[in-house]
Image: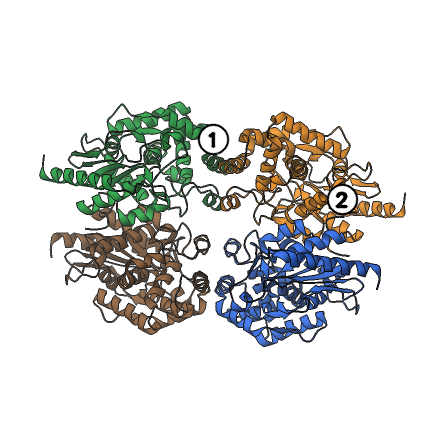
Chain colours: A orange, B blue, C green, D brown
Amino acid sequence: MPSSAEHLDRVIQEIAAEMAARPDRGTVATYIPELARVDAGAFGLVVIDADGHVAAAGDCDTPFSIQSVSKVFTLTLALGMVGDRLWRRVGREPSGTAFNSIVQLEREQGIPRNPFINAGAIAVTDLILSGHKPREALGEILRFMRFLAEDETITIDEAVAASEQRTGFRNNALAYYMKSFGVLDNPVEFTLGVYFHHCAIAMSCRQLAMAARFLAHSGRNPSTGLSVVNPERARRINAIMLTCGHYDGSGEFAYRVGLPGKSGVGGGIMAVAPGKASIAVWSPGLDAAGNSHLGRIALESLTKRMGWSIFGA
Amino acid sequence: MPSSAEHLDRVIQEIAAEMAARPDRGTVATYIPELARVDAGAFGLVVIDADGHVAAAGDCDTPFSIQSVSKVFTLTLALGMVGDRLWRRVGREPSGTAFNSIVQLEREQGIPRNPFINAGAIAVTDLILSGHKPREALGEILRFMRFLAEDETITIDEAVAASEQRTGFRNNALAYYMKSFGVLDNPVEFTLGVYFHHCAIAMSCRQLAMAARFLAHSGRNPSTGLSVVNPERARRINAIMLTCGHYDGSGEFAYRVGLPGKSGVGGGIMAVAPGKASIAVWSPGLDAAGNSHLGRIALESLTKRMGWSIFGA
Amino acid sequence: MPSSAEHLDRVIQEIAAEMAARPDRGTVATYIPELARVDAGAFGLVVIDADGHVAAAGDCDTPFSIQSVSKVFTLTLALGMVGDRLWRRVGREPSGTAFNSIVQLEREQGIPRNPFINAGAIAVTDLILSGHKPREALGEILRFMRFLAEDETITIDEAVAASEQRTGFRNNALAYYMKSFGVLDNPVEFTLGVYFHHCAIAMSCRQLAMAARFLAHSGRNPSTGLSVVNPERARRINAIMLTCGHYDGSGEFAYRVGLPGKSGVGGGIMAVAPGKASIAVWSPGLDAAGNSHLGRIALESLTKRMGWSIFGA
Amino acid sequence: MPSSAEHLDRVIQEIAAEMAARPDRGTVATYIPELARVDAGAFGLVVIDADGHVAAAGDCDTPFSIQSVSKVFTLTLALGMVGDRLWRRVGREPSGTAFNSIVQLEREQGIPRNPFINAGAIAVTDLILSGHKPREALGEILRFMRFLAEDETITIDEAVAASEQRTGFRNNALAYYMKSFGVLDNPVEFTLGVYFHHCAIAMSCRQLAMAARFLAHSGRNPSTGLSVVNPERARRINAIMLTCGHYDGSGEFAYRVGLPGKSGVGGGIMAVAPGKASIAVWSPGLDAAGNSHLGRIALESLTKRMGWSIFGA
């Protein structure tokens, strides 16, 4: 094991220890019981470097609901299926409003500002669904996740999916609103069915960091050498993560952490240091903008210690 | 001259030649006569690498109105004067609306979303002004620009400043609106006077690329070794440029170019490749979002050929 | 027949003749085929005075889709069922936006501004539905209409209801949005089912003018003497019609016509001259605000000739 | 004195007594010291019937700052000067937002929704000013008020005007914003100078009820028989008062009071019962929408007892 791996291991362990000691943990999402009952004290962190070394700390193998982190993978999948036609249905500008705002949709004729707000991710899901049955589309998404993470045990938490479906009135509103502008092709209940299910995928930090490797390494899996997307597409997905990955806290994340990343309301954040590492952190307590409180702080500490900010040494 | 410098020189010349050949040049700003009469055919490009090598092409020594590019320097200056207290007056999230939108201010009680939309830059100017006379504040800004660019010939185009002042009704509206929420300390006419004048600074691509060096090199001038800001502040200013530097085209710029940058309505764009180079491009024709049309295309070509995107190789 | 009735008859006939001669007829609604195929040349007008004299002209017995005119009757019914508790779910201020805007709902936490925009009428329908099956609630609404019009032949146009249901994505968005704020008690599909059906009630001008009598005469049917609502409630419903009855053309209607009224996208307008007459006009071509073009002009002419404006002689 | 006058006198006195006994008095405006120091216990009420009988109670001869009530008179004056051309600069729909909202202006390209929100009244003032010096325009407005009230003692409270001018940042924002769209012809400081001064006119309830007579009586002064505006214009001004006269409480006022009226932040409300009476009430405590709390309650009581609602007996 090279000394850089040892250094990384040490940094990861220190950060995990620091996070464990902090009293401030944010607020766990409570809109569905499955998320509400997650232990606020949980914390996991995994970093996989360019050599494939896996540095892991804390609850790194506990599966959690990846929620909006799944939007990065559905975007990748949809771009592979329909290419740049995707951008007729969704923009790529920061939204300037909350993740579930409908105001922006009224101003822009049903076109969501980017693929990482709820409306945008629903529009992307609708593209994946087109011409398929919901079950098939979902199967495709799950197979893609397993392929990326090299782990066939990844599954969907059906209880989470069912709860989302039962209470997802706001997402229904967004979807029907887009449908009224012709932005969705499929029946709303089909599109939302797939959407709620891919948000309910459960993964550990280890699995998520594995799945994110292609974004850190010019579109290819550095272990297998297999290309997932071309280098330009990897860069572009990273760019969208940087500008839009944390809802209305995206500017703050760029300012403090300085890495492309995507958060989910389950407390997970996936991030990449281009050319250097893929990263997953999980702590279920959220900040006011709906992003993992300790997750963001841990990543800020990580980039500082490792000198990984994309904005300079 | 090292071969990497030769390569850079060649790339710059090729890009300038390509841009000269393009028929699409965007639309020159016409809201004041001084900008309206600028030659739409102009194009300049300067890149200064870590070794201080200056690669220059086209109209690289023609001064142009830097306009909103000045906002990066006033932000830097104000942070030096008041530190993080600045963030009580202005946010750091992308705006999701046009550069001169007032809607956001109503929603957020007069606090501009970031220092690079007009309202935010006016709030920053107000901080620089505090305790000084307008003439002194302006002198400070101009001295700072000359110091950074190592060029005492940089001046303000008084005709531009006068025209801005005569027609700047929207900026008056923004300023009075913030004033009504107590976000500005000084009389609106004073703050706007300084604002209109620093936007009217005239610089060439060469001067602008010189002035931007500290942002590319961890806060210090790589030639003199003098520190302008600490490394963290340089990274953070770069982060804000990335997320907010091109108004409602910031996402697009990140997606296509992949560098922190700041554009101005005079057709200039200043950008940095952290650790590698500072860059200034100028072409007065603008795209729909108000950013230099050819400038953005030239930068996209530059980052691709040089492999400088911060989002991966 | 008293001479005032003769005068009214003459005025009605003259107006109908004038309207028939006009080339400008507005634009027939095309969002569902059942409305799109209505004859743009149709025009009907019925006025019933305090003595019960019925002055009728044109296509006064042709049933048309009353659409949003039904919202006056569901409001009346719901107020009878739940009283002023209704106002916890819906406001009574003009909206300042289009009939189907969702922006206002985001600003005001899911509470619609008034019972005559779509969102407000859906919230009112939800109150009528509570504790009942959709079929029962709909039966109640229909019985109420028949009772008011003294006409058992009034029915729902099932083809219109089915088309609305098939294409009513925007109304689904509004309803789910309100549901997400807890403003609706019942499943969205139930509430919208009832809503789409009561909007699809078909009535002639004669039937509508009959049904509106109680609003013109202090809450009671002047023929039978039966009280429908108390005088204060009648006045208040009239007030809401005046300020909110014509979507974002309510100010214009008050300015030109000067009577409380409610329009529907089927081209009908119901209006009342308090103490004097109930009125129904129908012409399917709409103006830009979605109100009957000739209907409004006919009413303007009627109030002028009869001196019926509530704003003075 | 006829018995109807006696009845009116009695009603007025009873209402004044009831209002004096109420503990709830709303909140006096505090944004300028001149308004903040007005006695919250003050209450005045004057009603002038069609025969010219003046029923007066309470502080009916105390001058107060009429503020936005002046907007009715400047609208009347401007319509006399430029006719329906006025409607190119301002709409006549309820705003659906607060009196000083700027959001609506962004959506509608600088055209205020109606002449009774601040922006609209500023646009109207700009029309009166055109071609004149501010002092002349103000003189014209003051002469008009004195002519209508038949009282040469009406003056402007210069201290109020000066305070408004010193603190009127929001109105500056609105004015500059409109100016940026070309909606104002004159320099902003001139237009606002006239605006702040006509809002600072001081009048008693007696003077205000006198001045409002023409609106209650088809455009003419019932004592002198002199016509101020034609009957249609009087009706139309009344219609705008009904739909837009109380900012975002206009629907509530129509619902509860049922008369066209206009309120001011000084606590005055002017109202008319068409064909019956002109009314002025004053109580400086305001409700949440910025309208006189007791003033509105007193008018609600008055219309109920006198049966004067325009929406029915």
To which chain does the residue with label 2 belong?
Answer: A
Q: Amino acid at mark 2?
A: Ala
Q: Is residue A7 left or right of residue B130?
A: right
Q: Is residue C225 visible?
A: yes
Q: Is residue D257 visible?
A: no
Name the spot of residue B8 as percent of width and height, x first. Answer: 77, 59
Residue A216 image label = 2
Q: Residues within 10 Å of mark 1 (few under 14, many from 20)?
A: many
Name the spot of residue C65 as percent of width and height, x first. Answer: 33, 31
Q: Secondary structure at mark 1?
A: helix
To which chain does the residue with label 1 belong?
Answer: C
Q: Amino acid at mark 1?
A: Val
Residue C188 image label = 1
**Could you tell me which residue is drawn at 78 percent across and 38 percent down?**
A221
Name the spot of residue C6 as percent of width and height, x first. Answer: 12, 38
Based on the displayed image, in which of its 4 quarters is residue B48 positioned?
bottom right
Residue A133 image label = none
